[in-house]
Image: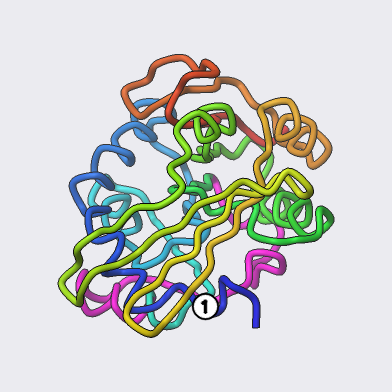
Amino acid sequence: MAWFQEWFGEEYLELYSYRDSTEAKQQVAFFCSRFGNLRGPVLDLASGTGRHVSELQAAGYRAVGCDLSFILLQNGRTEYGPMPLVRADMRSLPFCSGSFAGLVSFFTSFGYFSAEEENAQVVSEMSRVMRDGAAFLFDYLNVAHELQRLTDRERRATPTGDVTIERWYDASDRSFNKRITIGQKRYLERVRGYDLGEITAMFTASGLAIEDAFGDFDGSKYRRSSPRLILAGRKR
């Protein structure tokens, strides 16, 4: 079983409990300030529990979330109430071509697959389900920043007990890896690191034009030292 099929469950929610509605509100406000009103639905790709979907709806958008994890989707409906959430694999989205006027992707929900073709397929699917002129906001890690701040080992306290996190960068496939140990359970996170040039080429090949690159949700321009790589643009 692939790591992303095992990890996104109850333990994941405990470890990342600080990713809350306050953060989602700020990020959705950034999307609103950049693109304003959109005449059509917005897709939250890899939506998790749907916290951004809830905030997008509160901001007046017709938002739809999709995620592979049944547990995250189920928790979202319990926490935020009824909302349009779909269980789906981002490599093959169950939506008609040109369905969405906007698309968002938050908290590094890209680079999950070991084969380059599969990651490129995600971008192709993003483009396919967006109509011409549709807006996108894509929140991803900054490779240079992550390499500089890489911590080999740390311990965190969660409501269910202590967690040990081991991190390493694998140069052979340019992936950032985490081994997460919770009690007797062990999980893996693996994300392929793409730099701005590589992502630009991938997006351009699928008809997605990047208009701006930001380094955080305060709107600072992207630099190599920025904590994030946040791309804003439209489908050509």
Q: Quadrant of residue 210?
A: top right
In the rendering, at what x and y percent does residue 121 appear?
Answer: 78, 57
**Residue assigned mark 1:** 87
Choose between 127 and 73: the one closer to the eye.
73
Q: Quadrant of residue 89?
A: bottom right
Q: Does the magenta-highlighted stretch encompass residue 90?
A: yes
- In the displayed structure image, the side of residue 58 where residue 202 appears, left or right: right
Q: Does the magenta-highlighted stretch encompass residue 48?
A: no
In the rendering, at what x and y percent does residue 204 appear?
Answer: 78, 32
In the rendering, at what x and y percent does residue 187 appear?
Answer: 49, 73
- Within 10 Å of disc 1 (Cα), the crowding (few <14, some 14-19, many 20+) is some
Q: Is residue 18 above or below residue 86?
A: above
Colour pattern: rainbow
Q: Quadrant of the C terminus?
A: top right
Choose between 150 and 26: the one closer to the eye.
150
| Amino acid identity at mark 1 | Arg
Q: Residue at x 20, y 74 (%)?
A: 161
Q: Residue at x 73, y 37 (%)?
A: 203
- In the displayed structure image, the side of residue 179 where residue 143 appears, left or right: right
In the rendering, at what x and y percent does residue 152 appear?
Answer: 46, 47
Q: Is residue 100 above or below residue 96?
A: above
Q: Quadrant of the N terminus?
A: bottom right
Q: Secondary structure at mark 1?
A: strand
Give the residues drawn in magenta, as a range.
Answer: 73-101
